[in-house]
Image (tube, grey):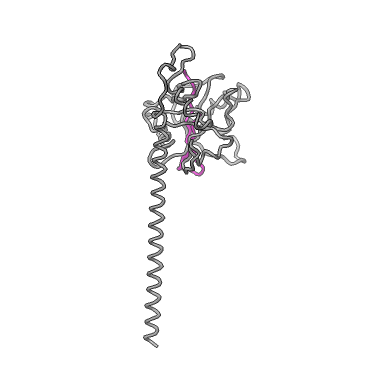
């Protein structure tokens, strides 16, 4: 009887050991799979950020007539648009890793998880709000982007929380097929996605098209009021705005936002 009991105990221990070993192996496999996926996606994002440099365009097509010059970057973007018409621009902040095509889809969901090649990727693309109308054009280029653990995508946007960083990175370059423009940073602030029942809050993410001059002025005033520091920059009705938005992990549904205006 005692021998039989000892055997059952031994079998139970073996079973537990096997199960724990299987769980450990499964955990290791899952960890490796996650890290491998992260590595592959990071390499995909690095490739995206460098794709413009791989495109050659005829130098004779570059013009500088002083009125409406055609830059090399504009020509490269036009070539890139042949692969995907959803590419509406190229965004760059010099001295950072922010150097990406900007996509615009029929909704604000698709490019959350896809790159410009229509490949699935968890960190998605930098993309323009679906409501922006280039034909009008709309008053505010509202551009979204994920953050990335290794400093890719919009991860470095959070550095604008420090005024010293702003002082070294005051301008943003945005290129479309028709223009190659510079935007000056006006404000940087923390925000979040507010509940529908919350009142007297600044829902910056609702502003793409101004209903009138007052609507525009209210947005600019709110952006300046919540800014972490005074840039000394403001905007008046008729000046093109740009709002860059990414996640902030210090609060629930947090966001970090940079607002800029077109200067030339």
Q: Is residue 37 magenta?
A: no
Which one is in front, 201 or 117? Answer: 117
Q: Which residues are magenta?
A: 243-264
Percent position of residue 215, x then y: 60, 25
Percent position of residue 255, x then y: 49, 38
Please give left or right for residue 235 compared with residue 156 in the image. right
Percent position of residue 120, x then y: 49, 43
Q: Residue at x 47, y 36 (%)?
A: 256
Q: Quadrant of the N terminus?
A: bottom left
Which one is in front, 252 or 104? Answer: 104
Which one is in front, 261 or 108? Answer: 108
Please give left or right for residue 196 compared with residue 38 in the image. right
Magenta span: predominant SS is strand
**Residue 126 appears in the picture as rendered:** yes
Percent position of residue 257, x then y: 48, 33
Please give left or right for residue 34 compared with residue 213 in the image. left
């Amino acid at each position: 009887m005692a021998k039989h009991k000892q055997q059952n105990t031994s079998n139970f221990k073996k079973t537990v050991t096997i199960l724990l070993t299987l769980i450990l192996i499964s955990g290791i496999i899952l960890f490796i799979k996650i890290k491998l996926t992260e590595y592959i996606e990071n390499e995909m994002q690095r490739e995206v950020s460098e794709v413009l440099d791989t495109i050659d365009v005829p130098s004779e097509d570059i013009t500088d007539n002083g009125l409406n010059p055609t830059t090399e970057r504009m020509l490269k973007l036009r070539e890139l648009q042949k692969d995907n018409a959803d590419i509406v621009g190229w965004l760059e902040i010099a001295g950072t890793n922010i150097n990406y095509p900007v996509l615009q889809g029929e909704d604000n969901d698709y490019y959350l998880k896809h790159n410009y090649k229509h490949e699935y990727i968890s960190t998605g693309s930098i993309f323009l709000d679906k409501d922006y109308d280039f034909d009008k054009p709309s008053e505010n280029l509202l551009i979204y982007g994920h953050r990335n653990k290794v400093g890719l995508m919009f991860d470095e946007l959070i550095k604008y929380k420090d005024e010293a960083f702003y002082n070294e990175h005051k301008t943003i370059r945005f290129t479309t097929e028709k223009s190659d423009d510079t935007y000056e940073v006006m404000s940087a602030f923390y925000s979040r996605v507010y509940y529908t029942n919350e009142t007297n809050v600044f829902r910056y993410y609702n502003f793409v098209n101004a209903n009138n001059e007052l609507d525009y002025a209210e947005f600019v005033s709110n952006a300046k009021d919540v800014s972490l520091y005074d840039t000394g920059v403001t905007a008046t009705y008729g000046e093109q705005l740009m709002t860059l938005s990414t996640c902030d992990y210090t609060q629930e549904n947090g966001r970090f936002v940079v607002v800029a205006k077109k200067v030339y």
